[in-house]
Amino acid sequence: MPEEDLVELKFRLYDGTDIGPIRYAASSTVTMLKERIVSDWPRDKKIIPKAANDVKLISAGKILENHKTVGQCKAPFGELPGGVITMHVVVQPSVAKAKTEKKVDELPKKTTCSCSIL
């Protein structure tokens, strides 16, 4: 693979630690990056994503879409020679878990009220 087709990325976790830097092909998809992040995630953290869908990547203030490639997501300042692009990682609970928790919260709450008319 030619050197110019590689992009060096590191991933900043919620507590300020990093995964990487690692070189990726410009044709790598965001989904591939997320899968790598989940497999390389430090096991000593309080929050650990279970699947790639639990992870959101943010670069240059934008949430990256799964079907996009690294080359499509690269910000213009990522063109600096020898520069490492930092992407921020946000862990979100899976949709199924969030829906389950929401259903519990939506259950009617039993409240008691008493009024006194004097």
Image (cartoon, helix red, strand yellow):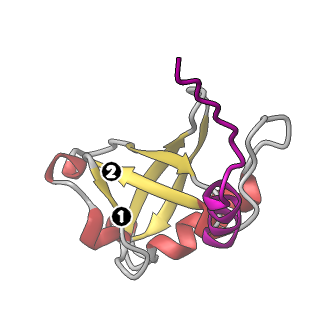
Q: Which of the pair 113/13 is nearer the observer?
A: 113
Instruction: Verify whether residue 113 appears in magenta.
Output: yes
List the single residue furthest toward the top: 118
Q: Which of the pair 93/117 is nearer the observer?
A: 117
Residue hosting label 2? 59
Question: Which picture quadrant has residue 84?
Answer: top left
Q: Which of the pair 32/94 is nearer the observer?
A: 94
10 Å crowding of disc 2: few (<14), some (14-19), many (20+): some
Residue hosting label 1? 64
Q: Earlier in the sequence, mark 1 or mark 2?
A: 2
Look at 52% across and 47% down and name the residue there: 90
Q: Amino acid at mark 1?
A: Leu
Relative to 29, 78 lies left or right: left
Relative to 31, 43 lies left or right: right
Look at 43% across and 76% down and name the residue there: 66
| Residue 79 % position (x, y) | 20, 52
Relative to 53, 46 lies left or right: right
* Residue segment shown in magenta: 95-118
| Residue 96 % position (x, y) | 67, 73
Marks 1/2 in contact by CB < 8 Å: the verdict is: yes
Look at 73% across and 41% down and name the residue there: 47
Dot label at residue 33: none
Does residue 41 sit above or below 14 in this rendering? below
List the single residue furthest toward the right: 44
List the single residue furthest toward the left: 76
List the single residue furthest toward the front: 118
Look at 65% across and 58% down and name the residue there: 108
The CA span between labels 1 and 2 is 7 Å
> Tag 1's secondary structure?
loop
